[in-house]
Amino acid sequence: MARKKIIAGNWKMNKTPSEAVALVEELKPLVANEDVDVVFCVPAIDIVPVVEAAKGTNIQVGAENMYFEESGAYTGEISPPNMLVDAGVKYVVLGHSERREYFGETNEDVNKKILKAFEHGITPIMCCGETLQQREQGVTMDFIRQQVKVGFQGVTADQAKTAVIAYEPIWAIGTGKTATTEQAEEVCAGIRACIAEVYDEATAEAIRIQYGGSVNAATAPELFAQADIDGGLVGGASLKADFGKIVNYK
Ligand code: PEP
């Protein structure tokens, strides 16, 4: 069965609640494409107004992070069941390279969050990707396989089938430097092979793997046409009308 493409915007730390609603209103008609899953991953404070603004549309709302505990004395953190699920969140970006780099998130933290997301019916979009130095040293796939294997520890095959993995080479994020189609496809195929090893062929065939890193309207069509690339995680270009073109890449 063909995998449905999933194209997600990662707004990062951009847009106030009122700006967020204005952006949803602007993008609503431009992203109306039922052939792909369209997800807006937005800052925590924008979740409630964005869910409200997106009602009745094909836009699904995601968070950019969450904690692996459910409630309690964790000042500043966000609870998956009590806050995200209640607010109407369907997806959560976990292990983005910016969270790993600036907030010290480890593969083990990401694993705990993935397990908790599944426990509450939230689909994780787990990010992985190498630095430029790792690419130049030829250890890209070793590094990513470790991120995937540790990130998915304890995740069942049935859960993994519904998960999303975003391959995001760190050197391509926010730099305007998209990986070549061949580079992106090679790693996405490698991630799928890793899932087949850890689980089985059926799981590898079902899991969706995105490419992320300076995707724009010009590069999306070729990237998303690759056999192992099931859509994209889009940063900068998700904040403008260009996102409509990316969603309608065909
Ligand atoms: C991202 O934030 O996940 C990302 C891919 O950003 P950009 O598209 O701006 O490179």
Image (spheres, rainbow, N blue to C red):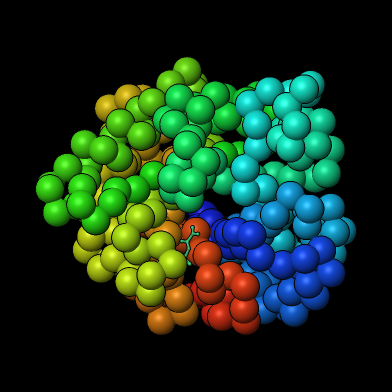
Residue found 24% across the figure and 56% down from its top: 132
Work out whether residue 114 or residue 249 is closer to the camera in this orientation and state it: 114
Residue visible at 70% across and 76% down in the picture: 27
43 lies above or below 122? below
Question: What is the count of numbered marks?
Answer: 0
Residue 144, placed above or below residue 250: above
Farthest residue to the top: give it. Answer: 154
Q: Does the image show residue 203?
A: yes
Q: Kindly indicate the quadrant of the structure image that contains residue 86.
A: top right
Q: Residue 179 placed where, x, y %?
A: 29, 65
Residue 12 x, y percent position in the rendering: 60, 59
The residue at 28%/51% (across/down) is: 131
In this picture, residue 208 sits left or right of residue 21: left
Locate residue 145: give its quadrant. top left
State left or right for residue 133 relative to residue 93.
left
Residue 133 image position (x, y, % from top left): 20, 52
Rendered residue at 38%/26% (across/down): 150
97 sits left or right of 32 in the view: left
Can residue 248 be seen at all in this image of the molecule? no
Place of residue 25 in the rendered image (x, y in percent of width and height, measured from the top left): 79, 75
220 lies above or below 77: below
